Amino acid sequence: MKLLLKAFRNGLGVLIALISRLIPVKKVKRDVKAQEAADNKAKNIELYQFFACPFCIMSRRVIRRLNIKIVTRDAQTRGGIYREEMLKEAGKVQVPCLKITENGKVSWMYESAVIKDYLEKEFG
Ligand SMILES: N[C@@H](CCC(=O)N[C@@H](CS)C(=O)NCC(=O)O)C(=O)O
């Protein structure tokens, strides 16, 4: 029963993720120089996530709206390198989580609302 519920939740999440991809977002517009600067800054950020997690879907929509490219890392696969890294370096597996590398220093940011505020402040 528990397994069935988990499969249902995951299936629903996948469906929501796919529908979310189809729903357009109003993207932030920048001139070429500003876009280049935003793209360079975004290179320092990685999104640790599960594909079908609703909080991750929301974070990915924020990223799309802000018109930046942020690498996504699969933190769901048990034993996977990114899940293990997150557990070891950040302390727990909870997604979405941003890994931010600044001047060689790494910091981790949990909570979709905090991530949204941070990204909007940096790229909005
Ligand atoms: N309040 C958090 C909730 C995040 C959350 O519940 N994430 C779930 C996935 S949907 C999670 O990380 N679960 C850990 C696990 O399944 O190992 C947020 O808004 O980011």
Image (cartoon, helix red, strand yellow):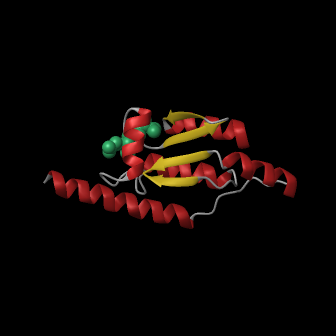
Task: Answer whether residue 51 is visible to the viewer in this image.
Answer: yes
Q: Position of residue 110 (x, y in %)?
A: 48, 35
Residue at 38% in and 36% down: 88
Left or right: residue 67 compared with residue 7:
right
Q: Residue furthest left?
A: 1
Q: Position of residue 27 (x, y in %)?
A: 71, 56
Which quadrant is the C terminus positioned in? Answer: top right
Instruction: Note whether 69 is above or below 46 in the view shown.
Output: below
Q: Position of residue 65 (x, y in %)?
A: 66, 53
**Which residue extends farthest front?**
104
* Residue at the spot 45% in from the left edge and 49% down from the top edge: 49
Mark yes or no: residue 31 visible: no
User: In x, y percent, where is residue 79?
Assistant: 30, 51
- Residue at image location 53% in from the left, 48% down from the top: 47
Q: Quadrant of ligand 1?
A: top left
- Tell me if 119 is positioned left or right of 94 in this view: right
Determine whether 87 is above or below 79 in the image: above
Whether residue 34 is situated above or below residue 98 in the rendered picture: below
Quadrant containing the N terminus is bottom left
Write down the quadrant of residue 121 in the picture: top right
